[in-house]
Amino acid sequence: MLELRSVSSGIVGCYGQPAALDQLNGNGATALRVAPDELLLLTDRSRVGELEAALGTADPTGVVLDLSGAFAIWALRGDARGEAFCRLSQVDLPQAPALVQGLVAHVPAKTVVLDDELLVLVSSAFGHHLRERLLAACADLGPTEAEPVLEEEPALA
Amino acid sequence: MTAGAGATLDFEGRPVPISPGDTVASALYRSGLRVFSRSFKYHRRRGLYCLSGDCPNCMVTIDGEASVRSCITEAKPGQRVRREGSWPSVDHDVLAVIDRMHRLVPVGFYYKALIRPRWAWRALEPWVRKAAGRGAIDGSRAPVDCETRHLHPDVVVVGGGVAGLSAALAAAERGHSVVLCDEGRIGDKLAPGETRDRVLALAARVAATPEITLFEQTPAIGIYEGPLVVLDEPSFLHQVHPREVVVATGAVEEHGVFRGNDLPGVWLGRGAARLAGVHGIAPGKRVVFVAKTDEAHAHVETLRAAGAEVAVVDDGDVVAAKGGRRVHSVIVERSGREEEIACDTLVLSLGLAPRQGLALQAAGGPVATVGDAASPGISLDAAEEQGRRAGAGQGVEPAADPALPTAPRGGIVCICEDVDVEELGHAWDEGFRSTEILKRYTTATMGPCQGALCHRHVRAFVAAQPGATGPGSGPTTARPPTRGLTLEKAAAGVRDDVQLHAQTALDARHHELGVTMEPAGHWRRPRHYGDPTAEYWAVRKGVSVMDVGTLGKFLVAGPDALAFLEKLYPCNVADIAPGRIRYALLLGEHGFVVDDGIICSLGDGRWYVTFTSAGATTVEATLKDWAETWGDKVHVVDLTAGWGAINLAGPRSRELLRRLSGDDLANESFPYLHHREITVAGVPCRAIRLGFVGELSYELHHPSDRSVDLWDALLDAGRDLEIRPHGLDALRLLRLEKGHIIVGQDTDFDATPAKLNMSWAVKLDKPWFVGKRGVERANAHDSLRRLVAVSFAGHAPPEGAPLRASGRDVGYISSAGWSPVLECGVSLGWVTRTNGSFPTEVEADGATGTVVEHAFYDPKGDRLRA
C-alpha cells in the first residue's frame, strides 16, 4: 500500500551561528538542521517574530524568515513507502527518526524519516514534479492520493 | 507465462514447439535450425557456439527487441523471433558476397578508401552501415518507460556459481544484507554433474536466507566508482550501492582460433554439454570432441547419453574445420601429421579464460574476485572456500594473470566483429602495435562479448610479434556495459532531467487564461495569453501584470554581508541607502557579464538581491562558492521559490495599486528606484519601483503561497481598467524599445560591460571585485565589437540576421521587433569596428538601419519616473 498526500505546514528558516541555532532546537517545533548555520522549523509562520527575538539574543546578525511557500511537502505512507522512495532516490534511508538530504526524482530534497511515514520536502517550484514522478514510477504499487492535511508537528526527535 | 503442452513461439512466421525449460535457442535448435545469424561484417553463417551468453552467434530479435541472446532467454509461448543482420534473409543472404571480397574491405578500409572524392563517404556511409551491424531498432514500438531502483545492501555478489553462492551465504551469516545476481537462472547453464549438484544445493540454502535478495536473469552491466553496481533486471535498472562487491562471474571457455573456426557446428564444450544435458538435444550425430580439460570427459559422456557418436581427440590440435553450411570435417594435427576426420559437429574443450570484465572495471575498489573469474579451472572446493572468505570479509589473494593461449595462426579471432588473424597482421604492419590501439583500429574485442572470447587471443597475437614489448600486450581497458542493454534501460530515470521544469505558484492561473508557455532556464514561463499585441498595449497605455516569480531572489545577511557584496558586484553597494535599489551586473572572473539584477538595501546589514530567471539556478551556487572561497560570515538565503513576484506595469498601475493598498504610493514618497514594504489586498509585499518595460512599474515580491491571492486581487480590481497579463513576447518588445539587454540573448561569451555600453555599471575605483582585472585588461584596448541599437524604417530583420556595412559583414542582430508605439523596426545588434570606427548605418536582409545612441522609447525616462 502506498498513500501520497500533500502536507501544508508552516516552515520557518533560521540562519545564524551554529551555537545560536542550537539553542533554538528546544522550542517545541520539529527541527531540521540542514546545515550548521541553517535550521528549518516546521512550525506556524506566526512564530517568526518570537524566533527572531530568541535568535537575536545569541546572534544579533542571525536571520529568521518565513519560508512556508518555499517548500512543497509530500508525505508517503504505507508499507510500500520505502520501495517508492528507492525508485526515485539513491539516498539510503536510515532508521527513524532521521533527516537525510539528497536528490529525489533529480530534485534537491530533504527527507524526514518517521516511524510510519516519509516527509519529502522539495522546492515548491518542483512540488508538481515530485507528485507526477511518484505516481508514474510507482503505478504498480497502486498509489492513492489522500486529501491534503495541515501538519501539526511531525514527531522527529 | 511458461511453456505448456502444445505451446509454440513464432519463428519467422512458423510455429516452433517449446518444451518446459527451453530457452529460445534450445527450442529453435530442436526444431532443426542450425544457422542462427550472419556475422557482423562478412555475413558468414553462424550457429550456436558457447550457449553461455557470451558469443554473439545466437543473437536474434525477440518481440521487436534487437540483438537478444537467445541462448539465455527463456522461451515463452507467442514470442515473435526473427533472425537479423542479413538481406533478404539469413538463409539466402546476398550480402554474403562481402565475404568473397574480403581482401577489398580489410579493417579500417573506410578510413582510407572513401576519403576521395569527398562525397564518397557521405554517399556510401548509409550502405556501409546497413551492410554491417546487427538487428535494427524497431521504430514503431511504443517507448517503454523504465524506472530505476536504488538499493543499499552491505554486499553485492555478481554470479550465482559455487563461489558466488558461497560468498553470499557467508556474508549473510555475518549479518550483512546481500544482493546476489545472476544473468540466467541459478544452475541453468550447467550440464548435469557434480558442479550443477553443488550449485543447486547452495542455491537452496540461499533461497532460505532472508538476508539475501536474489535477482535471476539479471546481468550486472557495470561497476562504477562508489562502488555502484548496475544491474539490468527485466523490470528495473537497479543501481546498487554496496559497501563491498564480490565478483564471481566465472570463466568462459577458451575460444578456438583456426581456419573455419566459426562454421555452424563448431561448439564450445560447456555449451554442447548444456544443450545435451539440460535440454536433451545432441548438438550433432557425429561429433569430434577436442578434450584438453579435466571436465571434458564428463561432457563427452553427456553427449553420448544424448545419442551422439563422439570421437575424442586428446592428443592433437585442430588445424582447420571444413564445411559450407556447417562443418563436415576437421583437420587435426597429431605429432606433426595432419588427419582429416569427417563429422557434423566439432566440440572444443581447450581451457578456461576468466570472465573478468567486471573485475577489471572495479580494480582499486572494495572488490574481491573469486572462483573461476580469478583462477580459471579452480576446484569446486577451492572456489567454495574463496567465496566464503570473500563473503566473510577475510580477503582473497589476487590471482595471477592466467597464461595466454598460443598465438593464433589463422581463423577468426574476434567473432563479434569479424576480425581474423590476417587482419590483425595488416593492422600490426600499419603500425598499430599494442593491444589498446589494435583494438581501436580493428574493433576486435569491442563487440557484444566485450572481449570475453577474443581478448586473450589478441594479447597473444601481440605478444608473439617480433619486437613486441611487454606492456604492449597487456589487457585493454574494460568499460561498461559488459552486457548489452536496451536504450530504454540506458535512459532509465534520465527523463527526470529532460522533463524537469519548475513552476511558479501561478502556473494553474496561467493555464486558466489560455497561456502558451516557453522554456526559460529550468522554468516554463508564459510566452503569451493569445494576443501579445494587446498585452503590449496594456502595458504601454493601461495596466498589466506579469508573473516574475521566476527571478532569482536572495537575502544576503550576516556580519560580512556588505564586504561580500562589494566583492561580488562591480558597482558600489555601501552607498545604497536603505529603501533604495541599484541595477547591478554580475561578472565572471574574466570580466564578462554573466547575469544582472538589482540590489535592494534593507538596512540592518541586510540586502535583497535578484538575478535573471534563467540564471536563478546557477547563481546560488556562484554566490555560495564565493562566500566559501572568501571565508565571509554571510548568510545567502535562496528565496526564489519562497517568494513570488508580480510586476504591475503601465501608466495606470499606481491607480490600481491604490485600490488595494492603504500605503502611501505617491511618487514623491515612493519614487523610482526605491522599494518599501506595503500591503496589497492583505498580502505583505516588498514593492520595488523598476522600469524594465519602460513604464511606471511596481514589482510586488511576496510570500509565494500568497501569489494566487495577490494575482486574483489585481486582476479583479483592474477589470474596469482592462487589465490583462502579459507574457515574454510582449516583455521582450517592451524592453527592446528601451534598449535594455537580456543577458544570454544580447550578450556573448565575451561581453564586457564596455562592449555593452554599460561601463557606468562598473566602478573601477573600487579596490577589488570579481572580474575587475578582466575589465581593466579589456578596457586597455579599444574593443573590436560592441552592442548597438539599430532602428529600421520598416520591419527589422529577424534575430540572427547578419549585419553588413560598406559591403562587409560586420555583425549580427541579437534582438529585433516591430515597435507598435514608434511604428518602426527596433533592434540590438553586435557590430565590429571597421577602418577604425563602428558603422553608423548597417544593412540586413535588404533593409537599411541607423545606429542610435539612446533608447528608442522615452529616452529621458520620464514615464518611469511618473
Image: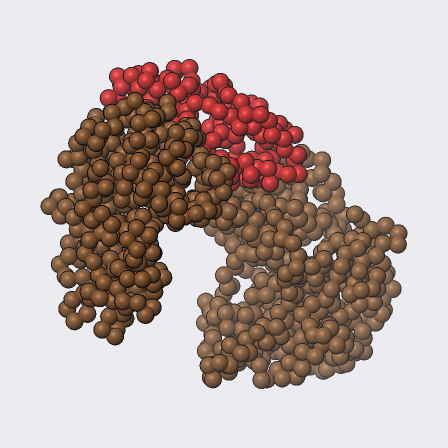
- Residue B63 locus on image (x, y percent): 72, 57
Q: Quadrant of residue B601?
A: top left
Q: Position of residue B324 (x, y in %)?
A: 75, 79
Q: Is residue B768 left or right of residue B490?
A: left
Quadrant of the rendered structure where residue A46 is? top left
Front-most of A54 and A44? A44
Residue in front for this viewpoint, B476 or B673:
B673
Residue B801 sits above or below residue A132 on the image? below
Q: Nearer the viewer, residue B210 or B663?
A: B663
Say which residue appears at 53% left-offset and 73% top-offset: B442
**Chain A shade:** red
| Vertical relation: B42 (above or below) B727 | below
Residue B782 percent across, percent down from the top left: 15, 62
Residue B749 seen by the camera: no
**Eyeballing the image, is A117 above or below B507?**
above
Residue in view at x 29 percent, y 38 percent: B651
Asked if one can make out residue B542 in the rendered structure from this viewpoint, the answer is yes
Residue in the foreground of this view, choosing between B315 and B497: B497
Chain represented in brown: B
Q: Where's the C terminus of chain B, which quadrant?
A: top left
Relative to B841, B15 lies left or right: right
Q: What residue occupies the far left of the structure in this picture?
A: B765
Residue shown at 63%/61% (left/top)?
Answer: B139
Residue B364 position within the rendered picture, expressed as x and y whole percent measured from the top left: 47, 50
Q: Furthest-front residue in view?
A: B720
- Please, which colouring scheme is shown? by chain
Residue at x 65% of width, y 54% of height: B142
